[in-house]
Amino acid sequence: MLAIVQEQQRHPVWGPYAQQLLEPGSGLWRNPGNGGHDDKAHPPIHPTKFSFGESGWSQDHHRLYELVVRHFLACASQPAVGAETNVEIDIAGELFSASGRVILAVSYVQKSKKVTD
């Protein structure tokens, strides 16, 4: 798993995040869990080799590779932390409710770069 992240450090878009993820003391790294169900159909989806994007790839190929890599890096990152508040009040028999969420700690954040041919 570390080797896959190390390879991704070379990419100009998400490479800096991969490098930061591997820095000792950054607090970003976490070993992904096994999930709740393993159907033994295939190993988890991850990039099998590094690529800057092959010249013959279509825009869809580029976007799919980016999706796989970003998802993999996010799975190796600490999860975001949020809080949710739910309020219910009864005023003269009329029930009112409201809810809200706030992100307390952002985790994997990487601005997307448009992929073009």
Image: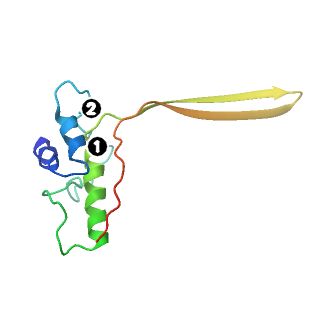
Type of amino acid at the residue the image marks with label 2? Leu
Above or below residue 33? Residue 93 is above
Percent x, y for residue 5?
16, 45
Residue at (24, 55) in percent of width and height: 45
Residue at (87, 30) in percent of width and height: 93
Residue 75, labelled with which disc? Answer: 1
Above or below residue 115? Residue 25 is above
- Image quadrant assignment for residue 75: top left
- Image quadrant assignment for residue 48: bottom left
* Left or right for 99, reference 89: left
Q: Work out which quarter of the rendered image holds the N terminus and state it.
A: top left
- Image quadrant assignment for residue 90: top right
Q: Is residue 38 visible?
A: no
Q: Nearer the viewer, residue 13 or 75?
A: 13
Percent x, y for residue 39?
27, 54
Q: Nearer the viewer, residue 41 or 54?
A: 54
Q: Nearer the viewer, residue 96 or 104?
A: 104
Q: Is residue 52 visible?
A: yes
Q: Residues within 10 Å of mark 1 (few under 14, many from 20)?
A: some
Residue under label 2: 28
Q: Residues within 10 Å of mark 2 (few under 14, many from 20)?
A: some
Type of amino acid at the residue the image marks with label 1? Cys
> Given the current orientation, which residue lies at the most extreme top position?
25
Percent x, y for residue 14?
25, 48
